[in-house]
Image (cartoon, coloured by chain):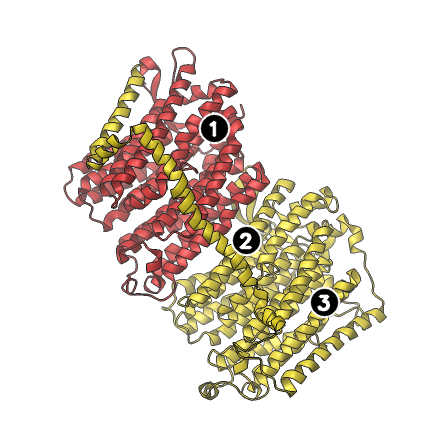
């Protein structure tokens, strides 16, 4: 029942929020997200980490005649992504308390509604159910970006929309094909897909159909061009949702619905996929160096970081895949924190132009420490969360091919280049007329950033808390892939 | 001599091992959280006491080591990263090498902490300074105590971060910030090499823990095995970054932007010697890779020579010392390259004493001169700064290799090993030695002799530093005087204390490649001859410096004066920074703009957009978008998809 509750509660809460008039909606939404967080922690406590199969399983007939079922459950992989979602969502809602958005009840209802979609995606064990939640998660973000975004929101959101729908349709087509390959009266259950025996040629094109859908979502070079614009134009909360949680849908999709479903396709194309991913690492990092807008800089850095995760996915090594897991958490935490800090700075100074700032550290020591910690996490300094992920991922890529590992490792250097450049220009130096009146963090802002900072060190110092959860499931996944 | 794991019930030793790094970390937390709230006296006390405490505990371990059977032991604090067969425990290893490094880091560290309490007393961020300094000591201790390569990497990057924070400590000043950033980024280039080396170690030996790796290597690998060469070269790339060797040395002179105690502690005595520590720690691997060692020797010698020539013409007191450090580090790598591991560490120790002394002395001068660092503005300071002068003189004699000061013994021993390996290398080493004595005495004459050349205001302000600063100078001067006796040459004594103490750490290497450790005993005549030549060379250099800067009282040319082309080339540090700027920095920057403008916006985006327009039938749809009804349009699309989905269900 717990899985169903986790999926349904945010949707129910969204309806409740719709009934609230005025800015009270944000508090109701925050409360609802906290309840969801407690549910998530409860599921974590009851979770058996030694078991590699899906727990809290629910299997109900949905469209029985077609063999489509409402089957959801959580193995270690799903549990970690569920935890990431329920952890970040209240913080993202809290981060918006400083804004008074128009039509607040719609805004917060959409965020909660999106959570339903996200949890659904991370727990669905039926192809069409997965697809259904995939689209459910997308609808709210279109509205959030399109209605509450910046000046160019319409054009940008439209592009984002077309791009992702384009990708989704490929995935749907692949699913339909797979569905018809299942024996008997056909079924769309994941486990049935895992048992399919398809020839290499079929798997080859299926690989691309699925890969395009997921690659656009992450995004992987060269399917990324919607991303910097969308991140820049969406309101801060939207950017955090997109970068912190939503892009993990694509990574998760590869883990669950691509690698084990078309393993022969993967063995044919993994080199191409890794090369694209590594191009993205270097390409995103180099472009990030000279961005003027802080938000765009982090957007390009995200392309770079996600490139490394994508490369790790296709190494099919235990280190690489466990690196994917822990880096999904780390990236979510760091990027949400960084986008929030940018939002704080933008609200205080009225701009995101790096060149316009300077000397903020003198005015805001608390902000400086939080910013510094999150930045160090992003540049993978040991004992922060980013190091564990990048270390494992790079080791995975290195095992796949040493030269690829070396090129992917450039992220270690380039990451420091663009991050320190931004940090120095924004935080250090003399203050100017814009930053002279800068004030340090408020209580609410601290309440968002402190949990993130704690997580940076928690994952950095004791990653085994999380690695142990996903280890059996990753092992099982590799078994299925190598079947 | 097998290492063993400290029994879990030996809680006393476990606690002490843990406390050594933990004390500075606690100091970091208290001073970090209490910056500007704690009174300066208390902040300074906490900062100094934490490091001093670690020093005392290190002494306790050192003297208890023999009683413990002289065997290395490891103690695991907790499981850090476990993924399948990759096991990385958060564990410490105490052996002869880490004990020596522990004493060095906490001992010299304590002295410099105390000095800082005086030097930084006027700074508003006094507490922050001490917290960073403590964090540095903590990281450095992780580096030398870690029981596996990943732990070493943790400390390695940790000291890099502290170096960044402390170089840019006065963060209102943009050039300082740039220097800090440069140090971090260049170190990261080296770190990538280190990281790849760790990966290859894990793939080759299935472990990253020292004991396991070295055991495997000593049994598995042949001499000059390709994989061992690759591992040692990759690790050495890391060492080149951290220990400022060619071509990754350019950050170190710029790092002088940091407060002077930082230059003494991090950029002279401890952090920059991490590369030497790494090679000695990996002596099994390096001994198996003589080809790498030859490369290390060449890089070391080239760096020693190259940096010494730059030191000849620098006019900033700290820059002279910085290039001198680069040069001396080159010496140490030269020694490693000829497999004189212990001699290299000997020089690490004596260099830490006299170079820390010289930097702190320079700090005292700068303090007295109200921040002036230009040698051309100094002169005649020996009268007003008698203690600083005397101690500085001792440091200068020590680095120049004049007996019986510490530098003489370590440098002599090191050069004797080089002599055995290659006479040509020895000759170049001697040339470096000549230049070292020359530029150091040039500095000494310019700063302390002759007439005062600063402004009236500076003259009025001149004063000897307070006791909190001069006592550390005296302690370091004593160490620089007697420090050499821990490694007396064979002609004087058969008991090379340091060498004997360190000998067990080479046991595996000795077993793997016995031939490499065959002693090359020099005859006593040769040994005396080498010593005499070293001293003679230094004395000639000193006399030359005296003739020019002591007797003739020449002052280096002012900025903008016309110099001979060669002089100009060296004075401008061979334009290496400009070269790197032209071949690396500028192209990357151009690529950043170019990729964004031409590939991102000029190629990929138009293709995507064109594709979108084509599928949607172009203008009609776009007009629809511009009508402002996008919200409903999107909704329609989504509903359409839901409909398709439902239709699918029905089919």
Find residue B104 and report its horizontal and vertical position in percent: 61, 65
Mark whose residue sits in front, 2 or 1: 2
Give the answer, above or below, for where B14 lies relative to A48: below
Of A464 and B272, the residue lying toward us? B272
> In the picture, residue A67 is in which quadrant?
top left
Point out the residue furthest to the top here.
Answer: A184
Q: Residue at x 28, y 38 (%)?
A: A157
Give the answer, above or below, for where A432 lies relative to A316: below
Of B433 and B119, the residue lying toward us? B433
Is disc 2 in the same subunit as disc 1?
no
Quadrant position of the C terminus of chain B in the picture: top left
Find residue B121 and report its horizontal and vertical position in percent: 44, 75
Of B634 and A368, the residue lying toward us? B634
Residue with the mark numbered 2: B189
Q: Is residue A438 left or right of residue B473?
A: left
Q: Residue at x 79, y 51 (%)?
A: B514
Q: Is residue B35 left or right of residue B95?
A: left
Whole-angstrom CA distance, mark 3 to mark 2, is: 28 Å
Dot 3 or dot 2, earlier in sequence: 2
Q: Which mark is residue B610?
A: none
Residue with the mark numbered 1: A259
Q: Which mark is residue B429?
A: 3
> In the picture, residue B174 is in which quadrant?
bottom left
Color used for chain A?
Answer: red
Q: Residue at x 41, y 10 (%)?
A: A184
Mark whose residue sits in front, 3 or 1: 3
Q: Are marks 3 and 1 in contact (CB under 8 Å)?
A: no
Q: Is residue A6 visible?
A: no
Find residue A132 and report its horizontal and vertical position in percent: 31, 26
* Circle 1 SS class: loop
């Amino acid at each position: 029942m717990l899985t169903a509750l986790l999926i349904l509660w945010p949707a129910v809460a969204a309806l409740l929020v719709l009934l609230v008039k005025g800015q009270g909606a944000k508090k109701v939404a925050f409360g609802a997200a906290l309840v969801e967080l407690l549910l998530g922690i409860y599921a974590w406590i009851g979770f058996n980490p030694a078991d590699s199969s899906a727990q809290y399983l629910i299997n109900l007939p949905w469209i029985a005649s077609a063999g489509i079922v409402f089957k959801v459950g959580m193995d270690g992989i799903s549990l970690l992504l569920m935890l990431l979602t329920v952890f970040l969502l209240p913080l993202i809602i809290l981060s918006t308390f400083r804004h008074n958005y128009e039509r607040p009840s719609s805004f917060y209802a959409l965020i909660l509604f999106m959570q339903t979609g996200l949890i659904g995606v991370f727990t669905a064990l039926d192809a069409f159910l997965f697809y259904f939640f995939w689209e459910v998660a997308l609808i709210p973000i279109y509205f959030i970006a399109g209605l509450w975004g910046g000046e160019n929101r319409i054009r940008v959101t439209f592009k984002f929309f077309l791009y992702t729908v384009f990708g989704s349709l490929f995935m749907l087509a692949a699913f339909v094909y797979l569905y018809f390959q299942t024996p008997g009266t056909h079924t769309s259950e994941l486990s049935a897909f895992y048992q399919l025996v398809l020839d290499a040629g079929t798997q080859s094109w299926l690989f691309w159909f699925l890969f395009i859908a997921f690659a656009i979502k992450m995004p992987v070079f060269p399917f990324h061009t919607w991303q910097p614009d969308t991140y820049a134009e969406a309101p801060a909360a939207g950017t955090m949702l997109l970068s912190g949680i939503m892009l993990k849908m694509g990574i998760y999709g590869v883990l669950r619905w691509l690698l084990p479903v078309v393993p022969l396709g993967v063995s044919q194309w993994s080199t191409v996929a890794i090369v694209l991913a590594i191009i993205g690492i270097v390409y995103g990092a180099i472009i990030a160096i000279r961005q003027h807008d802080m938000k765009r800089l982090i957007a390009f850095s995200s392309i770079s970081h996600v490139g490394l995760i994508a490369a790790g996915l296709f190494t099919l090594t235990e280190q690489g895949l466990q690196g994917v897991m822990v880096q999904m958490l780390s990236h979510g935490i760091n990027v949400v924190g960084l986008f929030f800090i940018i939002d704080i700075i933008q609200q205080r100074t009225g701009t995101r132009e790096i060149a316009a700032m300077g000397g903020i550290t003198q005015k805001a020591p608390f902000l400086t420490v939080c910013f510094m910690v999150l930045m160090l996490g992003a540049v993978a300094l040991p004992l922060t969360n980013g190091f564990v992920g990048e270390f494992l991922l790079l080791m995975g890529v290195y095992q796949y091919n040493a030269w690829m590992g070396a090129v992917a490792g450039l992220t270690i250097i380039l990451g420091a280049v663009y991050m320190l450049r931004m940090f120095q220009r924004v935080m250090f130096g003399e203050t100017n007329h814009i930053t002279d009146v800068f004030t340090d963090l408020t209580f609410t802002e601290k309440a968002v950033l402190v949990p993130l900072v704690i997580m940076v060190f928690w994952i950095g110092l004791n990653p085994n808390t999380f690695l142990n959860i996903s280890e059996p499931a990753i092992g099982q996944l590799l078994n299925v892939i190598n079947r | 001599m097998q290492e063993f794991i400290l029994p879990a019930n030996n809680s006393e030793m476990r606690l002490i091992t843990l406390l050594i790094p933990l004390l500075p970390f606690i100091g970091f937390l208290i001073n970090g959280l209490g910056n500007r709230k704690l009174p300066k006296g208390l902040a300074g006390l906490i900062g100094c006491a934490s490091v001093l405490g670690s020093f005392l505990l290190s002494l306790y371990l050192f003297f208890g080591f023999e009683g413990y059977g002289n065997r290395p032991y490891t103690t695991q604090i907790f499981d850090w990263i476990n993924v399948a067969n990759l096991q990385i425990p958060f564990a410490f290893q105490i052996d002869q090498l880490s004990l020596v490094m522990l004493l060095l880091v906490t001992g010299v560290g304590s002295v410099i902490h105390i000095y800082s309490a005086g030097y930084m007393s006027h700074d508003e961020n006094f507490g922050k300074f001490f917290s960073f300094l403590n964090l540095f000591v903590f990281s450095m201790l992780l580096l030398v105590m870690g029981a596996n390569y990943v732990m070493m990497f943790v400390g390695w990057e940790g000291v890099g971060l502290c170096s960044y924070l402390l170089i840019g400590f006065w963060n209102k000043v943009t050039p300082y910030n740039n220097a800090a950033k440069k140090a971090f980024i260049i170190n990261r280039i080296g770190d990538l090499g280190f990281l790849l080396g760790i990966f290859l170690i894990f793939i080759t030996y299935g472990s990253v823990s020292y004991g396991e790796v070295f055991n495997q290597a000593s049994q598995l690998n042949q001499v000059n095995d390709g994989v061992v060469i690759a591992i040692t070269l990759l690790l050495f790339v890391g060492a080149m970054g951290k220990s400022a060797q060619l071509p990754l040395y350019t950050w170190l002179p710029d790092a002088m932007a940091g407060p002077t105690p930082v230059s003494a502690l991090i950029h002279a005595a401890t952090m920059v010697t991490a590369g030497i520590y790494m090679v000695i720690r990996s002596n099994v691997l390096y001994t198996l890779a003589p080809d790498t060692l030859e490369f290390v020797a060449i890089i070391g010698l080239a760096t020693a020579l190259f940096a010494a020539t730059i030191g000849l013409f620098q006019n900033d007191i700290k820059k002279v010392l910085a290039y001198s450090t680069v040069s001396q580090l080159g010496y140490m790598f030269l020694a490693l390259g000829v497999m004189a591991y212990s001699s290299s560490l000997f020089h690490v120790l004596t260099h830490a004493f006299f170079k820390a002394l010289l930097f702190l002395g320079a700090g005292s001068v700068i303090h007295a001169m109200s921040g002036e660092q230009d040698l051309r503005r100094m002169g005649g300071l020996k009268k007003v700064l008698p203690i600083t002068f005397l101690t500085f003189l001792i440091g200068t004699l020590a680095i120049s290799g004049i007996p019986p000061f510490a530098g003489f013994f370590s440098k002599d021993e090191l050069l004797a090993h080089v002599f055995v390996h290659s006479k040509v290398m020895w000759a170049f080493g001697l040339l470096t030695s000549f230049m070292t004595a020359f530029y150091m005495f040039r500095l000494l004459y310019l700063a302390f002799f002759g007439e005062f050349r600063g402004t009236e205001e500076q003259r009025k302000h001149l004063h000897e530093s307070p006791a909190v600063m001069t006592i550390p100078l005296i302690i370091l001067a004593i160490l620089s005087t007697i420090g050499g006796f821990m490694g007396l040459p064979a002609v004087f004594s058969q008991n090379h204390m340091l060498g004997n103490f360190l000998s067990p750490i080479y046991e595996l290497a000795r077993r793997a490649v016995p031939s490499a450790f065959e002693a090359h005993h020099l005859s006593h005549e040769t040994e005396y001859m080498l010593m005499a030549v070293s001293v003679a060379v230094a004395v000639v250099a000193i006399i030359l410096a005296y003739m020019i800067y002591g007797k003739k009282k020449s002052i280096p040319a002012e900025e903008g004066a016309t110099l001979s082309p060669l002089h100009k080339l060296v004075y401008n540090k061979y334009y290496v920074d400009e070269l790197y700027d032209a071949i690396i920095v500028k192209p990357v920057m151009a690529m950043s703009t170019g990729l964004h403008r031409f590939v991102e916006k000029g190629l990929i985006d138009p293709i995507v957009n064109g594709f979108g327009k084509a599928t949607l039938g172009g203008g009609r749809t776009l007009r629809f978008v511009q009508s402002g009804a996008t919200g409903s349009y999107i909704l329609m699309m989504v509903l359409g998809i839901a409909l398709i989905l439902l239709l699918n269900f029905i089919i």
